[in-house]
Amino acid sequence: MPKLTIDGKEVEVAPGTNLIEAARQAGSEVPHYCYHPGLSIAGQCRLCMVDIEKNPRPQIGCNTQAADGMVVHTQTERVLETRKSIMEFHLVNHPLDCPVCDQAGECWLQIYYMRHGLYDPRMVDEKVHKPKAVPLGPHVILDAERCILCSRCVRFCDEVTATGELGIFNRGDHSEIGLFPGKTLENKYSGNVIDICPVGALTDREFRFQVRVWYLDTARSVCNGCARGCNIEVHNNRRRLHHNQGRRIARIKPRHNPDVNRWWICDEGRYGFRWIDDDRRLLTPVRRASGKDVPLGWDEAVADLVAALRRYRPEEIGILASPQMSNEDLFALQRIAGHLGIRAVDHRVPPRVAGDEDEILIRADKNPNRRGAELIGLTQGETAAILDGARQRRIKLLWIFQHDLLDSGLPAADVSAALAAAEMVVFQGPSANGTSAGAHLVLPSAAYVEREGTFTNFQGRVQRFRTAVEPLGDAVADWDILGRLGRALGGGDPALAATRAEQVFTALAGHVPAFAGMTYRAIGDAGLVAKA
Amino acid sequence: MATEVEKIVFAGADDRDLTKLAEYEAVGGYEALAKARAMAPQDVTEELITSELRGRGGAFFPTGRKWSFVPSKDQIPKPHYLVVNADESEPGSFKDNEIISRVPHRFIEGCLITAHAIDSKHVFVYIRGEYSGPYEILVNALEEIPKDVLGGVTIVVHRGAGAYICGEETGLLSSLEGKKGWPKIKPPFPAIKGAFGQPTIVNNVETIAAVPHIINRGAAWFAGLGTKTQGGTRLYSVSGHVVKPGVVEAPVSVTLRSLIYDHCGGIPDGRRLKAVVPGGSSAPILTADEIDVSMDADGLKAAGTMIGSAGVIVMDETVSIPEALMVVARFYAHESCGQCTPCRESTGWIYKMSHRIVEGKGRKEDLDTILDVAKRGAGTTICAFYDGAVGPYVSYIEKFREEFEALIPRDA
């Protein structure tokens, strides 16, 4: 492994590491635009100049590999002066329209100008004019005047998605990003070009003009859109409630995890958060009898469920858990089922249409925690048999989590018959659906961004997601609902006495061998792989 | 009187139509090829190193040494490519046009010897798109060549589409590969990873055309024609205000004065010489007082300019230097490929400033801004295009500053 000195600090880096990354390890920032660790080296923004001893002039850090004994300086007068010059060149034809630009506040032209530019502008001539507000596809819009032609978006579409929609057309200062004839930027990962665009050239058609980025708060989370469990940041707007059309979740951004999603997420995941703030959310527990909805407090709701669970024998109760639930939720549920001796438990409900899958990130299973449900062992029963039991009135209480059985791969007639035949249907989940509409007791659970917990992705990686916003209405995390239920049922199970998700996880780690030894702290931001 | 020199590149072409295979063979054509093929490839390269032949495209790199950089097929088991740069686009340079038009077979023979030296079976000739005449001549000449002369080597003639940057070594390779003509970042260098990712040697037409003579008559003879650092003769493209413009084959050490006055008949109509660009538009300009300089690379370097592609542009007293700068700045702004930020942004900016000055709307600070912008961008880009543009930006203003200042309104 090459050892080199950067700004007086010795670092040892992996062979092939370039000087931008090596400097990062040494604690020195080398500003750059075109370089992105997930893309090929372009070397065209010319901002990442560093001084290497024995070299007559500064070299670009992105295309220079760290070598043993190299002595690098990132702060020489010459380097600082070069950066300033390059910043001036980047801004010669830039419209400087920050007040109306959606990138303002997270724009690398602004950041680097303040850190490395601070020259007095000398350009007094008419700037080059280029197309503005050009939709490139369903999600991305281009302002070619703001573009600094770093080519990251072009390389992304060439190298990551291999769809090749984008190119750079014309020459010199008339160069501009654009679509090849007949193409639209609508690959399944198109939103990533917005993230990697360092300036305001590519912005998000849905997010732009909704809320200024400096009003956003950030929570580290995990996408719940498929079994990949891409690491994400949830950006939420709690400070300007009148912005973003009143919605709390403003946008989803990918969070780097080299073992899961690298720097990317798919558009499905990126834009799949609207349900969190929509009017199908369940806000309060409801008892439904003779066509009337009676809102309940949680004590009453839990008492109703306790009564129901006591009214029937364990073999008369069927539970359909959901792989949308966290490990904590599923473990709490498994404890309850265990205490009550309920064996008809499953989490497998076939989807109405098979999910799409690709070689990049997207998994066919659209649930974030299938593997967790398997490891925790919520598979003593079998969905079809449970519904069959209900139809034959052997199972009298159906407790359904999240699933809309009426909009699934199960035969609709069988589902309808089962739901009609059951004496009591309990639905627990964050949003209303066809199945909840017919339930006798509806319990609103918090959406994943409204609470914390862990999902286990298809690789067996256990990953934490954190609370971004408060639950809507009276919704409560599933593990918490189940804890209240467990305490009402009695028995003193510590997993059901928990007041924080972390305590449930600790109990889980103590009981399920795959999770043995894991803690929230050890899982951290990168996740830990469960033992197979 | 013109210093007479034995013609090397154009030997025999004044008396015969050397575009015809039979005529070329009558003056000993393709004998050097046979001789080279009887030699081991590395011996041919060794001969070239001894000959002191240097790249005639403008970068002046020793040709034999460049060839020696190609890895052996044991090291990198990939086909080797020879790419010939016939995209002659430097304003003021038109020698390659003349070589291909008049001695296409000598050029092809050079290609085949070079291919042998670098162990290549594939030659690509990237010819400037506008050179339709030379293209026809070259293609016709290729059709005449018997298979055994080609010796299993394929020669593909690829026409460019009009971009100056495609004459840059790696911009040419990108274009040849079917991509936008953007120069590539180095390393890797073409000798290791060039056209289509294969080890590739890129040579200029004039360089290649010198190769048969070196093999025929020996490296020592060739080296002896030149100076200490450079063998052979040189083709000068002389244009502008001279009585007899054209391509002149002359010693590498001829003086600029001799080129203008002896070889090209001096300045027409008794007008006075004002300035000369000695090596294509990218070479810094010389004033009329500076023409007693030797045209070899060292002489011009000492004079603060360069030989480049040896395109000599002569300007008499009727020329406005600010206008000349505006024209050359417009060229560089138009031809910048747009890949590197400093070049992309400042070529256009400098053109706008130079244009404003010529229009009488200059500001006092403009001249210093141009000089500063030019110097700040120099040496910061992937290829040498911008450094080439800096040559005229800086030298025109530094040497003719009063002429620029005269155009700037006093109250500006």
Image: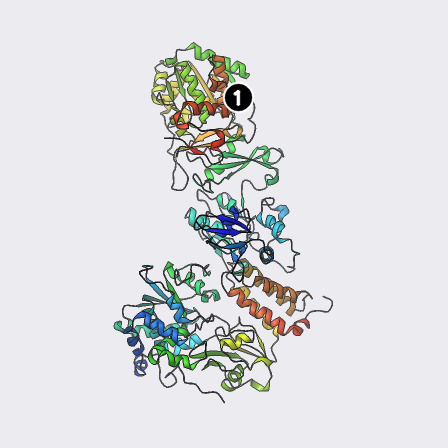
Q: Kindly identify the residue that appears in the image at 36 percent across and 19 percent down.
A: A386
Q: Which residue is mark 1?
A: A499
Q: Secondary structure at mark 1?
A: loop
Taking the spot 35% from the left edge, 25% from the top edge, the residue there is A411
Q: Position of residue A97 (x, y in %)?
A: 62, 50
Q: In the visual, does B341 lie left or right of A312?
A: right
Image coords of residue B180 (percent x, y): 45, 59
Q: Position of residue B30 (x, y in %)?
A: 30, 77
Q: Quadrant of the C terminus of chain B?
A: bottom right
**Can you see residue B98?**
yes
Place of residue A380 in the rendered image (x, y in percent of width and height, measured from the top left): 35, 21
Please give the name of the residue rendered at 59% of the width and 87% of the height, measured from the top-left corner.
B270
Compared across the picture, whether B82 is left or right of A217 comes to left
Could you tell me the amino acid type at mark 1?
Thr
| Mark 1 surroundings: few (<14), some (14-19) or many (≥20) residues within 10 A | few
Outermost residue toward the right in this view: B411
